[in-house]
Amino acid sequence: MGLAYRKSFRILPGVRMNIRRGSVSITTGSRHSPRRARRSMGRRTTSLQLPGPFGQRRTTRRLGRLRSIRH
């Protein structure tokens, strides 16, 4: 079983900074409004908690491409 590291800090009301093993992200929004997250790797995520059996809907966009540098 692998180990995971995650720490979350509240910066302002409705704004959180999330630190994970491989990236850092900023999340804005609350429980009753759409949440928007932006990761250090360029991925943007929007999520919305819908009532009833619909659960959570999420759309993710990845900006740009990760380019490898060859030496």
Image (cartoon, grey):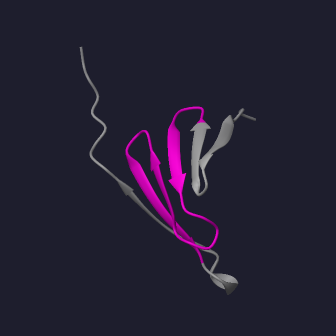
Dominant SS of magenta comes to: strand
Q: Nearer the viewer, residue 43 or 68?
A: 43
**What's the magenta region?**
20-49
Query: Residue sitting at 29 percent across and 28 percent down?
Result: 68
In this rendering, position of residue 53 left or right of residue 23: right
Is residue 19 one of those drawn in magenta? Answer: no
Tell me the quarter of the picture where residue 31 sits.
bottom right
Q: Quadrant of the C terminus?
A: top left
In this rendering, position of residue 16 left or right of residue 43: right
Is residue 39 one of those drawn in magenta? Answer: yes
- Which residue ends up furthest to the top in the rendered image? 71
Residue 20 percent across, percent down from the top left:
60, 36
Q: Please tell me whether residue 23 is drawn above or below residue 35 in the rendered image.
A: above
Query: Residue sitting at 67 percent across and 38 percent down?
Result: 6
Q: Nearer the viewer, residue 5 or 1?
A: 5
Residue 24 percent across, percent down from the top left:
52, 38
Query: Residue sitting at 59 percent across and 57 percent down?
Result: 14
Q: Nearer the viewer, residue 31 or 67?
A: 31
Q: Quadrant of the N terminus?
A: top right
- Which residue ends up furthest to the right in the rendered image? 1
- Which residue ends up furthest to the bottom in the rendered image? 52
Residue 62 percent across, percent down from the top left:
35, 52
In this rendering, position of residue 60 left or right of residue 14: left
Tell me the quarter of the picture where residue 40 sits.
top left
Q: Please tell me whether residue 12 is drawn above or below residue 21 in the rendered image.
A: below
In this rendering, position of residue 31 left or right of residue 45: right
Q: How many marks?
A: 0
Query: Residue sitting at 53 percent across and 52 percent down?
Result: 27
Residue 17 percent across, percent down from the top left:
57, 43
